[in-house]
Image (spheres, rainbow, N blue to C red):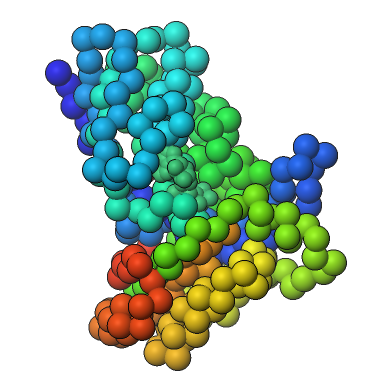
Amino acid sequence: MKTITRNAYAKINLGLDVTGVLPNGYHEVKMIMQNVGICDTLTFTGREDDRIVIETDDGTLPVNEDNLIYKAVMLLRRLTGDERGVTVHLEKRIPVAAGMAGGSTDAAATLLGVNELLDLGISREKLQEESVSIGADVPYCVLGQTALSEGIGEKLTPVAAPPQAYLVVAKPDIYVSTPVVYKKLDAKENYEHPDIDGMLRALREKDLDGIVSRLGNVLEIVTVEDYPVVDEIKKLLLDNGAMGALMSGSGPSVFGIFKEEQTAKDVCEKLAKANLAKQLFVTTFQNGENV
Ligand code: ATP
């Protein structure tokens, strides 16, 4: 049986702004999406029957229709009518429920991987367009390069990738509910908005200092109120040589940006000793290699 393997990369938000709420309750966003080197690995194998079988080394994840991988195969079936079975093996490394689009990137890798495995011939553009029905972050994950994301996440404009730097990503051992975070943000009268346009300029100019000075996420203030550990991690990163630090998505993952790899590794050790984060990574921006 033919087998295909794909890495599915996590994302962080260099900028995240909420610009409005639609009548259906969805939030309009303006986000700068960036892949990082932390990835899951998915292996796709054809089957003699028509079943969708998901296997994973992460015992906490559903392997039924609740898994976004399953939803991705179902979307391909809807688009093509082709019901050939597939086994998907998922090696999970991206922290779960972390604000790093772990499930969305697995869904995107499945759309691309199974499209190739079964020779379905669907264009990347079509997959990108249709994939918003699985989740708001999936179209970005299908695109797989630095992008401005607008609308509810489906309006994507590729933008210049940031210059290379080292990242520390820390996921504290807490669970944050994304809908609750958005609800609490809606209840706020006014709050500071990040300078997304300035960030786009800094990206175009390959100006790492300019990028770092404009890091901003409107959801951070909400999450920090309930989970001060997010702020404690940021503070430790900034006190120990990070150029800048920010929470990703609705959290609770926090990332710090560093010029030197050794500084990043040293901070990682400090975070581990301080027991502030359950999962810790030193990584870099992932630019374009997952396209
Ligand atoms: P986002 O940044 O898009 O908000 P997230 O990092 O907050 O995503 P995920 O890791 O995608 O969140 O997982 C959220 C929930 O989705 C988990 O509780 C999990 O049970 C479910 N889920 C379904 N499929 C997957 C998958 N392939 N990988 C991870 N979680 C999945």
Q: Is residue 263 above or below residue 199?
A: below
Identify the residue shown where x is 58% and y is 30%: 133
Identify the residue shown where x is 26% and y is 9%: 49
Instruction: Check the picture and name the quadrant holding the C terminus.
Output: top left
Q: In the picture provided, is 171 more to the left or to the right than 249?
A: left
Image coords of residue 194 (percent x, y): 67, 69
Image coords of residue 123 (percent x, y): 44, 26
Identify the residue shown where x is 47% and y is 63%: 174
Residue farthest along the left direction in this orientation: 1
Image coords of residue 117 (percent x, y): 27, 23
Residue 190: image quadrant is bottom right
Q: Is residue 121 something that shows in the picture?
A: yes
Residue 260: image quadrant is bottom left
Which of 225 and 74 lies nearest the eye of the viewer? Answer: 225
Q: Is residue 204 above or below residue 235?
A: above
Identify the residue shown where x is 66% and y is 54%: 180
